[in-house]
Image: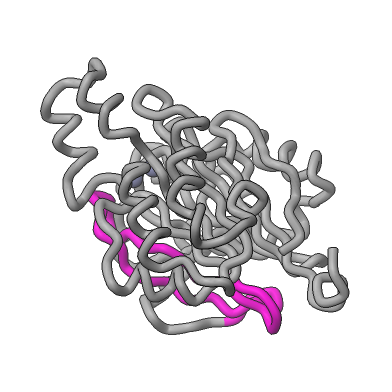
């Protein structure tokens, strides 16, 4: 941890990442927020505690979209701890209609607008639209006075807007869902392969590599790959593909790259 990190703490961890469930914590040291709650409420509380964070430090849950792997534990967690659930109007509509989250207390729902920054727990947060087949899908850009993080998961293509927010951050959390060969030769039915590859689907390892080759710059200090497919990807494949893309851009490729585990929490990272 450098001097700035201790003056302006900015911490991040993943509690789960992938199609079986997603949840991330971003905080300022004293308090923070969750992005998505796609695992059980009990597991979120336990995984946070294992990283030294009390659920009482969490001040809100931001949702990216209404797919179950992002909202499974949302209603139970939010209702129990009276946490505001912040999302786009379309996402909130999807959440209130979803069987897993229909019980969410309407009083806890707070609408946010894309590209309209707001403050929470000493952090400035901006949501931006991403192309995906969920309701009101967004990514998030979160910053304090010395560091920033852009999380973009569940998106079929990297739009100019997503690229803009990724390039503006010191830390990137980016979906690297599938390896094209594994998907092509795997057992998924054709319609599902088509859905994953579509512009409303998910990003491949090659999509991430192309982004890094084109847009990496020295202001980007850490890269986390998230939402890896269990069947159509492998952590080593995703990692190597990104490192190959970064080699030539930076000598620190291996050091700055982390593949977030699917079924367990990551450690707490000080950004
Ligand atoms: Zn997902
Ligand atoms: Zn999704």
Question: Measuring 40% from the left and 31% from the top, which residue is drawn there?
Answer: 229
The stretch of residues the image draws in magenta is 119-148
Question: Measuring 58% from the left and 29% from the top, which residue is drawn there?
Answer: 263
* Residue 261 location (% of width, % of height): 58, 35
Q: In which quadrant of the rendered view does residue 180 lie?
A: top left
Magenta-colored stretch includes residue 129 = yes
Q: Is residue 188 above or below residue 219?
A: above
Question: Measuring 87% from the left and 75% from the top, which residue is drawn there?
Answer: 3
* Residue 107 location (% of width, % of height): 50, 65
Q: Quadrant of the image for the C terminus?
A: bottom right
Can residue 75 be spotted in the picture? no
* Residue 269 location (% of width, % of height): 73, 54
* Residue 223 location (% of width, % of height): 56, 55
Give 234 or 124, whichever is nearer the viewer.
234
Q: Quadrant of the image for the N terminus?
A: bottom right
Query: Horizontal placement of 12 versus 198: left or right?
Result: right
Q: Is residue 230 above or below residue 173?
A: above
Q: In which quadrant of the rendered view does residue 190 lie?
A: top left
Give 240 or 162, whichever is nearer the viewer.
240
Query: Horizontal placement of 116 versus 122: left or right?
Result: left
């Amino acid at each position: 941890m450098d001097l700035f990190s201790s003056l302006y703490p900015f911490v991040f961890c993943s509690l789960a990442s992938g199609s079986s469930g997603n949840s991330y914590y971003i905080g300022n040291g004293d308090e923070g927020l969750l992005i998505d709650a796609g695992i059980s409420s009990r597991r979120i509380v336990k995984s946070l505690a294992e990283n030294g964070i009390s659920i009482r430090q969490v001040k809100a849950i931001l949702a990216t979209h209404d797919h179950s792997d992002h909202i499974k534990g949302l209603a139970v967690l939010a209702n129990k701890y009276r946490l505001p659930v912040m999302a786009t109007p379309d996402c909130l509509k999807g959440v209130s209609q979803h069987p897993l989250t229909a019980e969410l207390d309407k009083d806890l729902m707070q609408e946010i607008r894309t590209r309209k920054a707001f403050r929470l727990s000493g952090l400035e947060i901006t949501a931006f639209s991403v192309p995906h087949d969920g309701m009101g899908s967004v990514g998030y850009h979160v910053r304090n006075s010395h560091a920033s993080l852009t999380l973009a998961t569940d998106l079929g293509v990297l739009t100019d807007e997503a690229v803009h927010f990724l390039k503006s951050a010191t830390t990137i959390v980016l979906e690297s869902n599938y390896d094209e060969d594994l998907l092509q030769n795997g057992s998924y039915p054709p319609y599902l392969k088509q859905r994953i590859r579509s512009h409303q689907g998910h990003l491949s390892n090659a999509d991430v590599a192309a982004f890094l080759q084109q847009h990496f710059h020295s202001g980007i200090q850490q890269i986390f790959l998230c939402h890896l497919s269990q069947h159509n990807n492998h952590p080593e494949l995703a990692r190597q593909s990104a490192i190959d893309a970064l080699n030539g851009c930076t000598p620190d490729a291996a050091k700055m790259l982390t593949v977030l585990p699917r079924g367990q929490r990551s450690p707490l990272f000080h950004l």
